[in-house]
Image (cartoon, coloured by chain):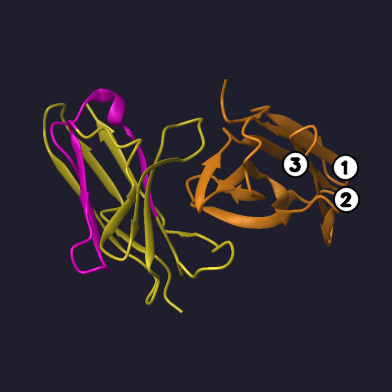
Chain colours: A orange, B yellow
Amino acid sequence: RKEVEQDPGPFNVPEGATVAFNCTYSNSASQSFFWYRQDCRKEPKLLMSVYSSGNEDGRFTAQLNRASQYISLLIRDSKLSDSATYLCVVNRNEKLTFGTGTRLTIIP
Amino acid sequence: EAGVAQSPRYKIIEKRQSVAFWCNPISGHATLYWYQQILGQGPKLLIQFQNNGVVDDSQLPKDRFSAERLKGVDSTLKIQPAKLEDSAVYLCASSPGLAGGFNEQFFGPGTRLTVL
């Protein structure tokens, strides 16, 4: 079983729609959690951290459920510029483990 | 502030040849990472340095891959000899390496390796 699993997509979503990504992780000792964004042929960049209390950054909301070992990302009012691959990432002892990424394309 | 620098950006070699990649981390960052990202997958950690010491190289195929960070700044990753399955993007990342909390990793643009 992979340490971090996420649906690779692709998700093709009309502009303005809401889209949600999910991710599960297998190691209960994982300490912190993140969503990274990776544009085509670019390096990954930190999008946001994920907390049990939930956190929001503009149109983006992330949520962690430690009991279910489940992480989510919600994008509201999607923009064309949101088209990218979204990587679910878990950290244990400063070692990051990445999921395969979910590819999102926003359609005009 | 300058980001993580990597070179070359692209490399095409034939199988069984050797290749080396170079990384210059963000100034002052103590921790340096090399990742391998195969097409359609997420980055996979190959090796982690803290200053010039290896912290984790458990996923580095040591029969063909080697890495060093001699002066605790720049790093090189070498593959000798290369196999077809080594075709991937090799990403270097660095972080401040400060104790007491998570240190964000900043990635370089990567080196895209094609092995023919």
Q: Residues within 10 Å of mark 3 (few under 14, many from 20)?
A: some
Q: Amino acid at mark 1?
A: Thr
- Report helix, strand or loop for mark 3: strand
Report the residue marked by disc 2.
A77
Residue contact between numbered discs 2 and 1, judged by CB atoms under 8 Å: yes
What residue is rendered at 42% in x and 75% in y?
B2
Residue toward you, B68 or A20 = B68
* Cα separation between marks 2 and 3: 11 Å
Say if B40 sits above or below B93 in the image. Answer: above
Instruction: Tell which circle, 2 or 3, labels the residue nearer the N-terminal end.
Output: 2
Say if A56 sits above or below B80 in the image. Answer: below
| Left or right of B37, for residue A71 | right
Q: Amino acid at mark 2?
A: Asp
Disc 1: host chain: A
Q: Which residues are magenta?
A: B63-92
Instruction: Tell which circle, 1 or 3, labels the residue nearer the N-terminal end.
Output: 1
State whether discs 1 and 3 lie on one chain: yes
Disc 3: host chain: A
Is residue B77 inside the magenta stretch?
Answer: yes
* Cα separation between marks 1 and 3: 10 Å
Q: Which mark is residue A106?
A: 3
Q: Amino acid at mark 3?
A: Ile
**Picture coordinates of residue B110, whole percent (x, y):** 38, 51
Q: Residue furthest bottom?
A: B1
Q: Which mark is residue A18?
A: 1
Question: How many numbered marks have been drawn onto this rendered protein structure?
Answer: 3
**Picture coordinates of residue B21, whole percent (x, y):** 23, 51
What residue is rendered at 70% in x and 38% in y?
A105
- Report helix, strand or loop for mark 2: loop
Disc 2: host chain: A
| Left or right of B100, for residue B35 | left
